[in-house]
Image (cartoon, rainbow, N blue to C red):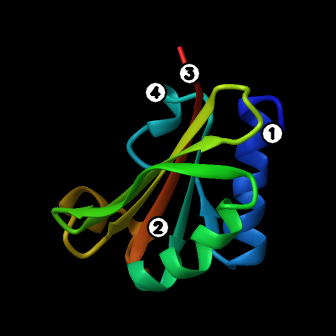
Amino acid sequence: MNSEQEVLERLVGILGTELNLQKITCPNNASDRYQHIACFVTDLEARGLITNLTPRLAEFARITSDWREDYSVWGAFFRVKNGTGILFGINYVPIEFNPELRDQPLLKNYKAMVDVTVAKEQ
């Protein structure tokens, strides 16, 4: 994985195929702000997702900022191990506590939205 797009595709595979999260169009025009982003919805609790996701990420990335919760949003940051300077962040955002997400029809029947953003170190 030598490009941001390749890393994003790997993350989409892990979240979508391996963990069965449903990929969606990112709300609030997030894809206009970020070139390499993917969004998902899930009914998993944050700790369940983190427990299943983190070992899969450890195969190709190292954690640079461990999972932490801030105002009910869980997030962590990672660096791809191959020395390409590619970084990514993952956020778990509960829909119930976020008014912007709660009003999105696409998200109403899910517990949380998960977003992944990939970028090259500058």
User: In the image, 21: left or right of 47?
Assistant: right
- The amino acid sitting under disc 1 is Glu
Tag shown at residue 121: 3
Residue 76, located in which quarter of the rendered image?
A: bottom left
Out of 47 and 30, give the one closest to the viewer.
47
Out of 87 and 36, give the one closest to the viewer.
87
Circles 4, 2 touching at the beta carbon (< 8 Å) = no
- The amino acid sitting under disc 3 is Glu
Which residue is tagged 4?
33
- The amino acid sitting under disc 2 is Leu
- Under circle 2, the secondary element is helix
Residue at position x 40%, y 68% in the image: 105
Out of 108 and 79, give the one closest to the viewer.
79
Which residue is tagged 2?
106
Check the picture and name the quadrant holding the N terminus. top right
Q: CA distance from mark 1 to mark 4?
A: 19 Å
Dot 1 or dot 2: first in sequence order is 1
Give above or below for 93 relative to 2.
below
- Under circle 1, the secondary element is helix
Residue 92 at x, y percent in the picture: 40, 65
- Under circle 3, the secondary element is loop
**Local crowd at mark 2 within 10 Å, few (<14), some, or many (≥20)?**
few
User: How many numbered dots are placed on residues in this image?
Assistant: 4
Q: CA distance from mark 3 to mark 2?
A: 33 Å
Residue at position x 60%, y 50% in the image: 62
- Can residue 102 be seen in this snapshot? yes
Residue 11 at x, y percent in the picture: 70, 55
Which residue is tagged 1?
6
Dot 3 or dot 2: first in sequence order is 2
